Image: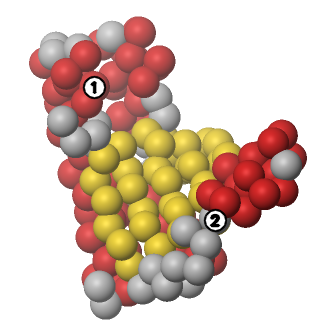
Amino acid sequence: MTYTHAITVALSWQDAVDRTRGALAEQGFGVLTEIDVKETFARKLGQEAGDAVGNYIILGACNPQLAQRGIAAEPQLGALLPCNVVVRRAPDAKETTIEAIDPQTMVQLSPGDATREVANDADGRLQAALKEISEKAGS
């Protein structure tokens, strides 16, 4: 089972991060958390560990309306939130990969109608964000 939607674009690291944030915002998502994996690995495991992963951030994206609908219908759904979006670029790479969680994975864990509706809405929005990034990058 695939659990992410992914695109690879010919954008610089910073352009990819900026465009990802912008595309998520246009789809109603705010970034609640940001984990800089490279910096965390370097700090916790040593500089070589950080350098080996390349540039890698995890954005915890949340659309408040969708989150509210999901949690109201099924309170334990909060354990699956926010929707993580990864922006990563391997050392010496010329392209950047952007991956968003496939919200349909929530339906695999909780097949209720309300969960399915929220997952479908979130899925459409995340895929639209990725499409926008890809189109603007010319990929």
Q: Residue at x 48, y 34 (%)?
A: 82
Q: Which residue is mark 1?
A: 106
Q: Which mark is residue 55?
A: 2
Can residue 24 be seen here? The reply is: yes
The answer to whether residue 119 is seen in the rendering is no
**Which of the 4 image quarters holds residue 69?**
top left
Tally of marks: 2
Residue 126, compared with residue 32, is above or below; it is below
Q: Report crowding for label 1: few under 14, some 14 to 19, many 20 or more residues within 10 A (C-alpha).
A: some
Q: Residue at x 75, y 47 (%)?
A: 41
Q: Which mark is residue 77?
A: none
In this view, the residue in front, 14 or 124, is: 14
Q: Residue furthest bottom?
A: 138
Identity, as a three-letter code, of the amino acid under mark 2: Asn
Disc nearer the start of the sequence (2/1) = 2
- Label 1: element kind: helix
- In the depicted structure, whether residue 78 falls above or below residue 95: above
